Image: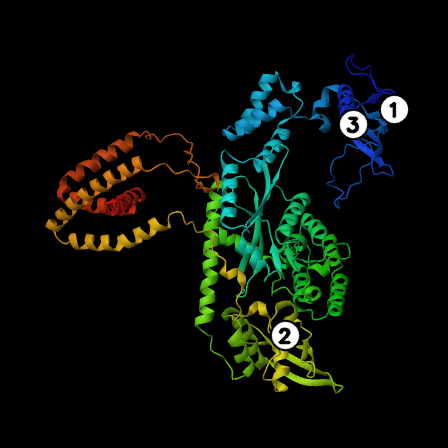
Amino acid sequence: MGEPSSSPPNVQIPIVGMTFNSENELREYYNAYAQSKGFGICKLGARNGQDGKQKWFSIACAKNGVFTSKGKNILQLRPSIKTNCKAKINVAVRNECEFEITSVYLEHNHILSPGKSRHIRSHKVLDSIAKRRLEVNDVAGIPLSKTFQSIVVEAGGYENLNFDERSCRKFISKARRLRLGNGDAEALCQYFNRMQSRCLNFYYLYDLDEESRIKNVFWADGRCRAAYEYFSDVITFDTTYLTNRYDMPFAPFVGVNHHGQSILLGCGLLSSEDSESFIWLFKAWLSCMHGRAPKAIITDQCRSMAIAIEKVFPNTNHRFCLWHIMKKLPTKLAAHAQYKSIKKALKNIVYNSITIEQCERNWMKMIEEFELEDNDWLNSLHVQRSKWIPVYVKCHFWAGMSTSQRSESMNAFFDDFVHSKTSLKQFVEQYDRALKKNIEKEKKLDFQSFNSTIPIVSGYSLERQFQSVYTNDIFKLFQNEVTGLMFCDTSIIEDDGRTTIFGVVESILGTNGEHLRDVSFKVHYTPVESFVNCQCLMFEYRGILCRHILAVLRRMKVNQMPVNYMLDRWRKDLKRGYQSITNIYDSDVCDSQRNRYNYLAPMIQEVQQLASMSEDNTSVLAEVLKEMKEKFMLDSTSSTITTPPTTTTQTEKLIHSPVRVRARGRPTTKRKQSVIEKITKSATRARKKDHVSTQEQLNDQVSTQEQWNDPVSTQLSFTSLLSCQLSHVAD
């Protein structure tokens, strides 16, 4: 069974002692032999020597080995090609340029069919000509199915091709991710060069593929790099946002500033979401930030990200987004008969556990009660519990964040500027505008915190202390804890003369004010060392004192909070260096012209308004403007001739959006009318003749209304008005 037939004359049967100059040459030979016989190949069993170089490997039949299904449903198992076939060749690497076949096994335990070789995975190879045609036709908008059919016709049938349509689709999918349209790469380079000429601290890095195409990009301006010095304690990273026509995920590094507002600390565009791309991006960001890794990072539950973070940021606390995990509950557990009870129990464990011991105890109780011992998803979550359950991670500072909503909110922020069809040319322009808006928002919040204060809700001196130093948005959060004091009762549990342990019982109320439950917390207080610590660890992970600590301090009549409990990152009275950095996104090329325009515009509008009050004044102003326009045009022409041409460097060229492509589609045609429609319309026209005068008035009203409702007419009206204004300025 499976005895190989005689090989074609041009493909020699492998024998012991055959040598090749490279592994690629050997693989091409054995693959050609396998194709002529009707089986696929795969590499296995590679071994390295003590010097780390490859010394031995095997190329075996693709049906080598035994397939073990990991599916739980025995009625829906995946098909397998494995038959534990022993056919293979063993190869010894004598040196870097000599590969010798040491043993050959030609016997197969399955039927060989040379006529079906083109369907085997190892023989599906796209040649360079086919790749070129696929890519060119894809850029031209020709559907892939039609391109593939043309290749089939040219080859004389499917049987003469070494690939199928699925292989073509995979290639086009990858090419679309990596491809940059005509001018996009140049625009990106010009943008980065221009930014760096304005600010030496502007940092950017490319990652190119073997064809010198941009694969991954990272950049951060001087303001982002300076802000990282103050807000490097925690960042979120998310790649679920697509911002350009190449489907390159937008990967922002997002932090939290002193207002609790999202702040961009660098960003990238990736061609894929594998560990290799993430490692490149993280290394680029680490190099940009002078080798200073973040203290904590929040991502979604992505294995590729976890591998990259572990390698590039080994000392960084990594946490999974809690929201991404909890939203999977319906998908993973909805089929269970007791789903609602399981959901309630799991949420109680996640959100209401105060200690790790309590969390572990309730988790085991849930698993036993609902018989979930064999649930792979819950088991995997329990293994990774230290990276997502709040009670395990709240000992580290997270600025109050438990999810990657910061990155997603930054994505939503960019929604006003970019979309899935945005080219990279447009993206760099819109990115500038988005950053301007974000910076302006921060400046506005700074002014509000400087210019106004939020009234206190109690006469407590600690509230006044935080009111004077914290930004308004952060003080609101602190004020919520102050108002929560009315729901807390304190009592002394233990006092050894140095440290006092208080018990604080908080009453939890529902949305309608109904009492739900009481929760007890322990607060340790050492007055000599000004040390206070609560079991809820709110200050540790959020940076704001909790109501339980405030209740103890109020009982101990503490009126002045130690400085170490007032974090600098929330203060409004500190001058942060990055805020004084000039906004490099404002071009100074046309500043003088813009100033002159701003000076003339209000006067021209005032004169225009006065002249429009009478017909005579309008005629006089029109004549004056015509004369001034002709004069200014002559002056402009003469200055153009006498003034030597100015040269612009490559970095000073403005970014232009690509020409808008005309939408494809057939023109509209008149629909054929039936006989009944023709008779009905004739009768309607006859009735209209009796109401000509009334109808003319109605038509005038409708015409006026349609003119303002029609976007084209409205656009033309505004275009005419704008042209008039511009001509006034020119005059």
Instruction: Return the disc, 1 or 3, that comes first in the chain's sequence.
Output: 3
Amino acid identity at mark 3? Glu
According to the image, label 3 marks what residue? Answer: 23
Counting from the top left corner in percent of width and height, residue 17 is at 88, 21
**SS assignment at label 3:** helix
Rendering quarter of residue 671? top left
Q: CA distance from mark 1 to mark 2?
A: 74 Å
Q: CA distance from mark 1 to mark 3?
A: 17 Å
| Residue 298, numbered circle | none
| Nearer-the-camera pick, 542 or 366 | 542
Counting from the top left corner in percent of width and height, residue 623 is at 15, 44
Amino acid identity at mark 1? Val
**Going 32% across and 30% down the picture, which residue do you hit?**
670
Rendering quarter of residue 567? bottom right
According to the image, label 1 marks what residue? Answer: 104
Task: Note whether residue 309 is visible.
Answer: yes
According to the image, label 2 marks what residue? Answer: 564
Q: Are marks 1 and 2 in contact (CB under 8 Å)?
A: no
Q: Nearer the viewer, mark 1 or mark 2?
A: 2
Q: Compared to 467, does 435 lie above or below?
A: above
